[in-house]
Amino acid sequence: MTRANEPATLTQADGRHARAERTREAIVEALLALLAEGVLRPSAERIAERAGVSRRAIFNHFTDLDDLLACVSRRRMEAVLPLWPKLSREGTAAERARAVAEGVCRFHEHVAPVRRAAVLYAHDSAFIAGQLREAARMHRAAILAVFEPEIEAAPEETRTALAGGLAAAASFSMWEELRNNQELSVDEATRAVRIELEGMLERAARNQPR
């Protein structure tokens, strides 16, 4: 037999759940905003202030800051994966090198704020470290698929080095070196990556067995 107050009880429970979800979402968005602004290790107090909630609310919804960062990392991964460029194996090596440089570098620039934070937190978070390893594996596989004909045509003793060099030239680590340490603009850094890719491919072509 249904009790008369059951609909009201369910409505109250739904309301509490909706408020909890809004609070959780506000906390996640606050951390994402701070990371995008270059605040790579924001305190719980600063996150709470940005979200408009109490510090206690963070730990009511997340086990700790690592749990919060893991949630943010998953959210960011879901958002950025569709932005990974569609890399074709069609065209000359130089044309593919240009396409890789332009597409991948644009992707790196977009994900840079959260990626930098992930690198910092990876030392303390097995989850974040695992995500970075998976991202590196996916990146390498995508780059090597584009240049598979050139890698396969290279002398056997140089294939591993060529594959590693191509993946490294288009990596986020290279992008950070060019953008931050070398202080290149986006266009300059993209051109540097393209030149590096083209140079390796040209040298590999010259060294192909006759």
Image (cartoon, grey):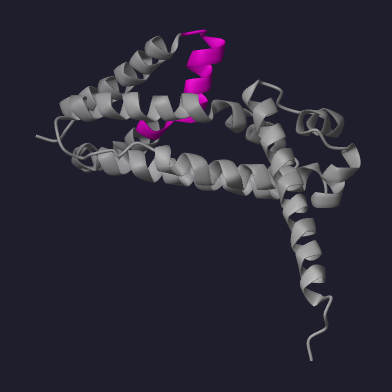
Above or below, 181 relative to 80: above
Q: Which residues are magenta?
A: 166-184
Q: Is residue 127 left or right of residue 5?
A: left
Q: Residue at the location (29% across, 44% down)?
A: 145
Above or below, 1 relative to 155: below
Q: Is residue 148 left or right of residue 11?
A: left
Q: Quadrant of residue 185?
A: top left
Residue 63 in picture, x, y percent from top left: 82, 51
Q: Quadrant of residue 2?
A: bottom right
Residue 83 in picture, x, y percent from top left: 41, 37
Can residue 161 be seen by looking at this rendering? yes
| Residue 183 on the magenta segment | yes
Above or below, 23 relative to 188: below
Can residue 170 be seen by looking at this rendering? no
Q: Front-most of 15 and 98? A: 15
| Residue 89 on the magenta segment | no
Residue closest to the far front: 4
Q: Front-most of 44 and 194? A: 44
Residue closest to the far left: 210
Q: Residue at the location (36% across, 35% down)?
A: 161
Residue 101 in picture, x, y percent from top left: 33, 25
